[in-house]
Amino acid sequence: MYIYLDIIEDFSCEMCGSCCLNDWLVTLDEDSYQRNAQLFMKTGRGEAFAQIFKRLIDKSGLGEYAYIEKKATGGCWFLDENNRCLLQVEAGHHHLDHVCQIFPRYPMNTARGTELTLSFSCPAVIRMASRIAPLTIIRSERNPITIPSNNDVVHVYPEQQPVWNPLRYYFELEQHFIDIMQCRSIQVWERLQMIKDTAQAINCLTRDQSLGQQITKVFVDNYELLDGKMTAEQELNYYIPDIVLENFFVNFIFKKPFYIYGLQPTIQLLENIWQRIKIARKVVTDPIVDMECTKSIIMEVEFEYSHNRRALFVHKERHG
Ligand code: SF4
């Protein structure tokens, strides 16, 4: 079974070069490192290879072997002035490291099957998400995209958790949080607050055999509350920067941070992200400027907290 956000079907790279220009580390596994070593040695470019491909002393335990050096002016070594990847031009798309082949796609291995979404650090993705229709989760027997196998970013198997652990009910939690985030009768910050409060309440429930029933009761109470706030569709006033934010948070939840990091750390993560978004948009009154500002802060936080796990590791090391 493939479970994915509908935007994935329509994505195509616009070759804007943003992903190759930012300051993340483009890391390689050992196979990719050796593949490039062969390519460079075969053409007598051993010195260039040593200059471009650097071994990593990997303290993060993320299994990365090497990284591609940046240009002195910033950006990936292989990015030319027309935003073309020179490594791809020389050796083909299949030669690239899996990270470069897959980005901005985000594959996940879960008990439900293969789950897929996109990273909001790509401007083309944000453009696709700037639409009024809510994001939809599609379930299909058909794989919507072709990507190299064994590149799952996360592995999620809730049934391996004991019955007294809230993460045992993870898929129900995820759907509930997405339902809250897509309830447009209340403001985005109110939805976020409700998600944080709900996660907090669930974290404090009695951890025994009745946990599943207790969680269901929390959901029912929340749905009743949301039903009471329901506004007629024609009365909803759509503001695109808020819609993009909604879609960003839906995507964020779908990437399963509550399972990966746990309830409490994710509540804190959401709070940090929201504070940064709030500060960035604070002085903006013009909707067009607000849209640009919202897009750029979303891309920034996505890089930092979601896609670039090395950055998250470094952040954790510094701040605990
Ligand atoms: S940021 Fe997105 S659209 Fe731009 S080059 Fe990278 S994948 Fe393509």
Image (cartoon, rainbow, N blue to C red):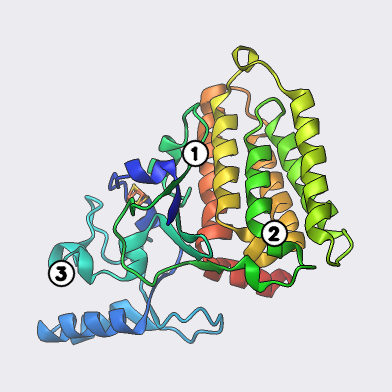
- Quadrant where the N terminus sits is bottom left
Residue 230 percent across, percent down from the top left: 72, 23
Residue 100 percent across, percent down from the top left: 33, 64
101 vs 227, nearest the viewer: 227
At label 3, counting other C-alpha atoms closer than 10 Å, the crowd grade (few under 14, some 14-19, many 20 or more) is: few
Residue topped by disc 1:
136
- In the figure, is residue 259 to the left or right of 154? right
Are the residues at dot 1 and dot 3 in contact (C-beta closer than 8 Å)?
Answer: no
Q: What amino acid is at disc 1?
A: Thr
Mark 2: which secondary structure? helix
Residue topped by disc 2:
169
Q: Distance between the residues labelled 1 and 3?
A: 37 Å
- Quadrant where the C terminus sits is bottom right
- In the figure, is residue 212 to the left or right of 130? right
Residue 108, above or below 12:
below
Residue 86 percent across, percent down from the top left: 20, 63
206 vs 186, nearest the viewer: 206
Residue 240 percent across, percent down from the top left: 54, 26
Of the numbered discs in the image, which one, if any, rests on residue 91?
Answer: 3
Residue at x 58%, y 23% (from the top left corner): 239
